[in-house]
Amino acid sequence: MSTRLLLNRLDTWRTELGLMPVPLFGHEDESRYVLLNGGKGNFCLDLAGDGQDDAGAERDRAWSADVGHYVKVLQDQVHVWRWDQSSAEIIKRDLVANNIVQFQTYLEERQPSRTSSVVGHFISIYRQVRTLLGSNVDGSGALQAFLYLLACADDSNGNSSVSHIDWNKLPRARELAESLTQLQRDGIREEMVCTRPGDRLTPIIPLVLRHASGRLFQEAHYLVELDPQQSLFGAPEAKPVGRDSTLGAFFTPSPLVRTVVEEALKAQPALAADVTVLDPACGSGEFLREALRQLQLRGHAGRVRLVGWDISSAALSMAQFALDWERSQSGLNVDVELEERDALALDAWNTGASLILMNPPFVSWQGMNEVQRQRVTERLGALSSKRPDYASVFFFNAANALGENGVIGAVLPASLLDGESYVDLRQAIANIVRPHLIARLGSHTVFADAMVDAGLYVGVRGQIDRPPLAVWSSHKADSSARALRRLRSITPMQVSSHAFDGGDYSVYAAEHLGRDGTSWAPRPYAAYQLLQEVGHLPKVGSLFDVSQGTITGLNSVFLVPREYVEALPKGERKYFRPAVVNNSITNGVLNDNTYVFYPHGKGLEIDSEEVLLKKLKVFSADRLVPNITALRKRSRIKADQWWVLSLPRQKLDAKGPKLLSTYFGGAGSFAWDSDGRYIAIQGYGWTPKSNAIGGCETAYLALLNHPLVDTLLSGVSNNLSGGQWNLSERYVNHLPLPKLRADETITEVLTVIGNALAQGQPIDRDMWNRSVSAAFGLKRKV
């Protein structure tokens, strides 16, 4: 097949790049598309073959669709327009055809600045409307007026948008818009449809509404509700939307919406003629709108009923406008039913929904008010354990509301996938719903302006004849987008046996994932495979007591550098011991760069303030007394002993020689405290549970510091934004380790290696690798 034919085929771009093509204008038999992936790298693709360029049209289309580039495939060339540049870049067609992935990466790396985006342009117009209406009109009213003026501006292009919107659901829109003078309305319409004088870009409202309204409405919602004191003359680009800290409302990024809807429709390809879609926390209606769009792309010909609930009237106004407009473009028989209501105030969600799609509010137990906590407890009943997230009830309600063969697609807090608090809840849902897809998105930057640990779940109430797909991505910012692109490129024939490991992301079929209450969190494919090989070994929790170290309650006061201790009077130095913090262990070697004040243990107890000031004159005057107010506010201490540590682990600290780890880390973050001097502060102590492995600690040190352990940790723990693993007992207790015996040859070899590691001495790495392989029973060399 020639390269010319390849680039003329939409399937080439879809399968090679894992991008979702959406017709640019939504017309039948259209040859212009928007190829969508994530927050960057989206572009317009023109396969019409028209050799004449119109710099204004290409730039306007890309800008109005809120993508960076317009790519036109011609006979021998590919023309690439960036909307902030006046001329096209011309590339040989064969060069693009033979390097299509690199071409897409090239586009990702050359994105225009967001400061002049079409969203910023229309947000600035909304600000003008709000200013012109005056302080007597609130943000919600100004938003309705803005939507009416937007529809009127679209009508000037002959699109009849005004007649397609149910203005009864937006009762203040026309009245407030027409309260402006004719001159003011004309000025606003001109900004909405006319060419901008500086960059010569012209808004194309149908493209703005079709492709940019999601981000536009979400940022407008921020201005309406989350920033009531906003400056009306602020920067043209709105502040990135994150979450409402009161409501737990995280605005769903378009890539996640798109993926959840795509996979939900794949999970149940044989939908009934009449489809009801429910989003119980719909916000501005992105899930409902995407569902309608993808049903249309699939050729669905039946009735579609879109049901959305939310507690924000402003969000519902935008949802009503967006869904009415989308309905008018689809040609389908669509009913829109939006209500201002709290989904958890309902006893049941009896809507007959065949698709429930949602991004429920993420609210931790600590962040809930009493009413919310009561609802969570009542709705979950016996399944409520410890401190569940508010989103867990939405998930449970959705699973129970599905009819036979119904599908649930949700963005969820990642803690629901592997948290110990949710074991019973996961089991209850697994009894009802079979998973089609479970994703663990490691990057905490998936959501704009918010650090969110997110996962995806798509499942069917009924039987699925193939294993679920597991999607895992690392902490790196672009790993989630790459994983979702890979997911989109999988054909139906590949699903049951698919296995891909890209290093920073994995997509593979996982037979037992999501089938019971054990962890649902996908792991890197390399870890998944390794755990299959060594899963028969004992777990750390059966071999060691892994105990959290001492909690000082105020590290900034109690932790000091070694040099500080050395400069103290000799009589005061005995009250300090070397501390284990995150930088105290490097490649298995302890350092005593940090010390902790430790007035605990035989001969060190200080029972009165008078004794304290007498025995620790320098330290008291320098660190304790100046911070006495903060020290007294700590929990777990008596008011008359404000200088003690909040929670000393004296039993652990008195153990003598012991294995230690940092709080966060990986291979190389374990050390041997040969004389028991160290106090774990930001770390953990490991002590054997039986005499059978007593004396083997340095052999275990050789195992735990081997790079193989990073792969094992990736299979049981969660990583941070910096890529380190959480080494708390909650995770490492599930780590497989062999049960070593002191009289075995392999233990003797590992002990020699462990002792060398602890002292920072060179080791025979080939022997280390062979010994670790033998200890774990692996047939291959690690």
Image (cartoon, rainbow, N blue to C red):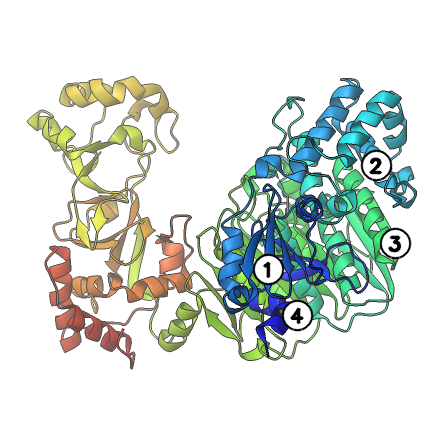
Residue holding disc 4 = 9
Real-space Cα separation, disc 1 to disc 4, in angstroms: 14 Å
Where residue 413 appears, x then y in whole percent? 56, 51
Where residue 678 appears, x then y in whole percent? 18, 45
Q: Is residue 318 or residue 456 the one in the foreground?
A: 318
The residue mark sitting in front, 2 or 4, is: 4
Crowd class of label 4 (few under 14; some 14 to 19; many from 20; radius 10 Å): few
Mark 1 and mark 4 residues within 8 Å of each other at the beta carbon: no
The local secondary structure at tag 1 comes to strand
The local secondary structure at tag 4 comes to loop
Q: Is residue 236 or residue 257 the one in the foreground?
A: 236
Crowd class of label 3 (few under 14; some 14 to 19; many from 20; radius 10 Å): some
Q: Which numbered circle lies on residue 78?
A: 1
Of the image marks 3 and 2, the number of the one nearer the N terminus = 2
Crowd class of label 2 (few under 14; some 14 to 19; many from 20; radius 10 Å): many
Reply above or below: 228 against 474.
Answer: above
Q: Label 2 is placed on what type of residue? A: Ala
461 relative position to 149: left or right: left
